[in-house]
Image: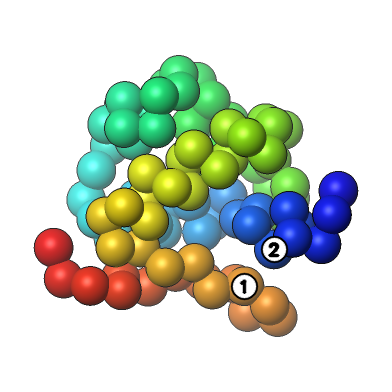
Amino acid sequence: MSQRDQRRLVTAGQMRAARALIGISQTELARRAGVSVPTVKRCESEGRNVPSVSIETQSKLRSALEAEGVEFTNGENPGVRLFRSR
């Protein structure tokens, strides 16, 4: 995995927090990202940093959340914040 790909990965906690920030369900996130609900659930339930889905799938989820103004922060203290008001 390239360093660029690693920077794009988000943790399960970041995924849950991002979805909560914009107030959407797992079903709605799945619809917006074009993935299945079980895929969203799997991403959000992982206990480690790298979920068991492809980088392409995770990128779809991340892009759907970023389209709503979520910004992922990485580094030593991964987190999320709302970049713009909805």
Name which residue lies at 21% across and 50% down. Answer: 23
Describe residue 85's horizontal placement relative to residue 7 as left or right: left
Q: Which residue is mark 1?
A: 74
Looking at the picture, does residue 47 appear above or below residue 43?
below
- Between residue 84 and residue 80, name the one nearer to us: 84
Question: Do labels 2 and 1 touch, CB within 8 Å?
Answer: yes
Describe residue 32's horizontal placement relative to residue 72 as left or right: left
Q: Which residue is mark 2?
A: 7
Q: Is residue 26 visible?
A: no
Name which residue lies at 48% across and 48% down. Answer: 62
Q: Residues within 10 Å of mark 1 (few under 14, many from 20)?
A: some
Looking at the picture, does residue 49 appear above or below residue 43?
below
Q: As shown in the figure, which amino acid type bears the numbered disc 2?
A: Arg
Q: Point out which mark residue 47 bears.
A: none
Q: Residue furthest right?
A: 1
Element class at badge 2: helix
Query: How far is mark 2 from mark 1, CA to CA?
Result: 7 Å
Q: Where residue 59 sits: x, y (%)?
A: 56, 43
Name which residue lies at 45% across and 19% down. Answer: 36
Q: Is residue 63 visible?
A: yes
Looking at the picture, does residue 53 appear above or below residue 10?
above
Q: Residues within 10 Å of mark 2 (few under 14, many from 20)?
A: few
Q: How many marks?
A: 2
Q: Where residue 29 sits: x, y (%)?
A: 34, 35
Element class at badge 1: loop
